[in-house]
Image (spheres, coloured by chain):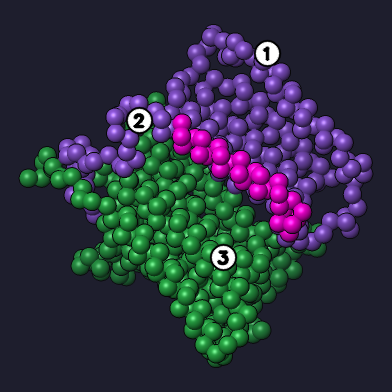
Chain colours: A purple, B green
Amino acid sequence: MLNEIAFYLIAGMTVACAVAAMALRQLVHCALCAAAAFAGLAVIYLQLDAEFVGFAQLLVYVGAIAILIVFAVMLTRGEEVLPGSRQSSPTWRTGVAVALVVLAGIALPVLASPSLQRLAPPAAEIPGKITGLIGVELMTRYVLPLEMIGVLLTAALLGAVVIAMREETKDKAPASSTPPPHTGGGEGRGEEVALSERD
Amino acid sequence: MSALDSIFISTEHWLAGLAPAGVRPLVSMLLIIAGLMAVFGSCFALTTILERKILGRMQNRYGPNRVGPCGLFQPLADGVKMLIKEDIVPFSADQAVHFLAPVALTAPIWLAFAVLPFGRGMSAIELDAGILFFFAIGSASELAVFMAGWSSQNKYSLLGAMRAIAQMISYEVPLVLASIPVLIAASSLSLPEIVQAQSGFVMGWIPRWNVFTPWGLAGFALFMIAAAAESNRCPFDLPEGESELIAGFLTEYSGFKYALFFLGEYLGLFAVTGLGVTLFLGGWQAPARWLEWLPSWGWFAAKFGVLIFLFIWARATLPRLRLDQLLNFAWKFLVPLALVNLFVAVAWWQSGVWQFPGALELRWLLGTGLLAGVYVWLGRALKGGKTAEHHYNYAE
């Protein structure tokens, strides 16, 4: 009973945040609402006794992806959508189609999985130390998929670095990754006052 | 164990027993929460006055000495001052986000105390993945700093927030990498189990704490440096550099909201220090067998106090870093060193099967040798050439 009330509260707030993330006009507000929705999902995982997944969700989505979104908003235009102007992109139909295909790609295997056949697993079946079991399974049975994901992410990281590097060589003739040399004036001015004094 | 050792647990049981049986779990939970908040709240007050006293001592001045005996009531006066100050919100600020930012920073940090074992059997909740919970909760504060900086609509605030986030993301990597060897050694993510794995003595007198191994010593140093940066402590406090950014993301906060940020910063420092004690210094374990009659929470508090003193000492003596130095230090020095440390830890663990005489000494020699070699090599490689000559417009 208490569990159900908590679930409906959290689920309602998560959905509300997700809707707000799409509907609000200020991009930063949207990003913050998206972060709140991610956190709500993590709480739902925790309610399902999936400790590891819940904490990983918090760590990755709130700690990393939300920050990434916020940085992207800050470093691009970050303008408010004015009232009256259209809020959705002109290619929103394509976006919806892509989202539906991705949803189907995730939903079909989930619906076909055997764990859905028995909707309410008896409590005795839940082992105590799930986190340890996940670790063992990841390192033995699923080690190849894990490594593949690692390689994929490394490739993506290298790709991002390459894209960022190419732009720099176009601007300046000698490509250098060293920090810019210290020219006087603006940058160095505050440095002679190095003592921190808050009190 | 002795009655003194479990005094907090038995007091809590006794108090909860006074409540009617139906609400007993709820009352017990509330009691633990109230106890944690009282202890660390007063710890915060005590640390502010001690920090100012010690800073004064080290910098050859008096420090606060007017309010009460030896200035001991200074935190009270500060608290009252903060409470009755006007709460100024800039006209162009984003009201909702500006209001929520201090709450979003302080609230998650309280949660982090829930998993720390402060004594034998003294952790509020025993999670199977306790350390993961700790880091997950810690990552929420980055977003709060961004909220504060962005909503103030002030270029100094925004710059300070950007610096703070870049710094927190960068130093989270060595922080986590430095604690991974401990998790491997204990083969558990649960903090009470990590403490339990460090019990006992090597050769009868050296405690089996992680800090008394080559990888543990290096990991402890890396962890403490990264912890100082994570909690914006000097010498890594440039997100709020007064001389260049007029307090960064705190610029537009006053009164009690500023006090909340201040509280959050210190609580973050306490939480990560408590984690350092748990991971590397054996948690609540006594350093010698004949000292085990002292209560376990006393040992935790003693180690905790020593580490807090080290942070204050560093603040009194070290100058602030420049931003490029800060980020280079994290990515080019701490992260590679933490990875080498992980390798040394696994090698140390694997070479535990060596049985010949002098095996322990050889393992120590190899471990410290590899770490020291990489340390010197990285340090030399990063020294760089001479920086361009500085021109100070107003100082000459």
For image coordinates 50% across by 71% down, the residue present is: B216
The answer to whether B89 is drawn above or below residue B205 in the figure is above
Chain ID, mark 1: A
Residue plotted at (56% across, 39% down): A155
Quadrant location of residue A93? top right
Q: Which residue occupies 59% across, 36% down?
A: A35
Magenta residues, start to end: A136-163
Q: Is residue B353 above or below residue B85?
A: below
In the rendered image, which residue does mark 3 sit on? B181
Q: Amino acid at mark 3?
A: Pro
Q: Residue at x 64, y 77 (%)?
A: B6
Mark 1 or 2 closer to N-term? 1
- Provide residue A100's location: percent of width, then percent of height: 74, 22
Q: Give the answer, above or below, for where A102 lies relative to B65.
A: above
Task: Determine the main secondary structure of the stretch shown in magenta.
Answer: helix
> Is A138 included in the stretch rendered in magenta?
yes
Q: Amino acid at mark 2?
A: Thr
Marks 2 and 3, how far apart in space?
A: 40 Å
Which quadrant of the rendered structure holds the C terminus of chain B?
top left
Mark 3 chain: B
Q: Which residue is mark 2?
A: A169
Report in which chain the residue with disc 2 lies: A
Label 1 in the same subunit as label 2: yes
- Closest to the observer: B26 or B161? B161
**Residue B179 % position (x, y):** 54, 62
